[in-house]
Image: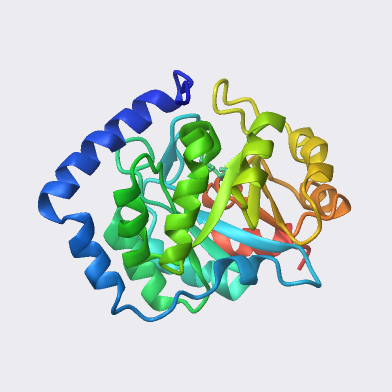
Amino acid sequence: MTILSNRLKPICDRRAEDVVAGKAQRSLSDIEREIANLPPTRGFTRAVTEPGALRVIAEIKRASPSAGTIRADSDPVAIALSYEAAGASALSILTEPHWFHGVDAELQAARAQVTIPVLRKDFIVDPWQVAETRLMADACLLIVAVLGESTADYLAQARSYGLDALVEVHDEAEMDIALKAGAELIGVNNRDLTTFIIDLANAERLRPRVPPGIGFVAESGLETPEDFARMRSIDAQAVLVGSALMRAPEPGAQLRYLLGQ
Ligand SMILES: O=C(O)c1ccccc1NCC(=O)[C@H](O)[C@H](O)COP(=O)(O)O
């Protein structure tokens, strides 16, 4: 049983209500029957841990609880194409509708136009959402602050569908849970989801705890080429960047700038 921060709790409670409505439309076993006929996913973990360079997971994020509206008029397909052309290794697309203004259909439309893998960024509170994610994306986000020790069960479920998982942690205790759960890709969030304070030192502090062979992603608050250099210096395999790209007039051009191109 996890105790959610007062910032995460309303988001997760609302998502739990959405799940009740979703289940009334389509049961878990109906979704699992559909999954059995799907082609394989695009290999999110493989794409973001490919050796040779710092990989970028470029995020499509219209709004957030910490920033409010980031980009009201965004066209997800155009932004996805611009990220891919600028060298993103993967996309992260927020689908949470109430605080982030995400839309499942927009993720599907964007994924259909690119060849790189797509992470569905949402707040998973029920196994039904893992199955639902397999219908539209290549990877799901499992937040240890939300799922606690049951992260292991969610990870096993995702694997059973051939769905990759980015397991997100913020501190040492959550890192221990992610490692014990057998995560293959761990994201360290530099944003404290209890206060929204961002500190890149969080990724630096937790980096040595991730053994070789497990992918390391630094998430949130990466805004400058110097921030990217800082994450390269700790041997992060990838960075996940949202606001700094979505606020720029040309998100793809901003990604090229952050990559030093
Ligand atoms: O971004 C928020 O305000 C937020 C609040 C509560 C839960 C999650 C939140 N963000 C989700 C993310 O993981 C970020 O969108 C992602 O790491 C990118 O961060 P940034 O580059 O700082 O936009």
Residue 44, percent across and down?
56, 67
| Figure label count | 0
Quick one: 167 or 243, which is closer to the camera?
167
Q: Residue at x 85, y 49 (%)?
A: 234
Quick one: 195 or 101, which is closer to the camera?
195
Q: Is residue 200 left or right of residue 19?
A: right
Position of 208 relative to 249 (above/below): above
The answer to whether one can see residue 150 in this image is yes
Q: Residue at x 36, y 50 (%)?
A: 95
The answer to whether one can see residue 67 in this image is no
Position of 193 relative to 60 (above/below): above
Position of 103 relative to 195 (above/below): below
Indicate the colouring scheme.
rainbow
The single residue placed furthest to the right in the displayed view is 233
Which quarter shows the N terminus? Answer: top left
Q: Residue at x 44, y 27 (%)?
A: 8
Q: Is residue 260 left or right of residue 78?
A: right
Residue 27, percent across and down?
17, 55
Q: Is residue 183 left or right of residue 94?
A: right
Residue 195, percent across and down?
57, 20
Residue 60, percent across and down?
47, 54
The single residue placed furthest to the left in the displayed view is 24
Q: Residue at x 76, y 68 (%)?
A: 261
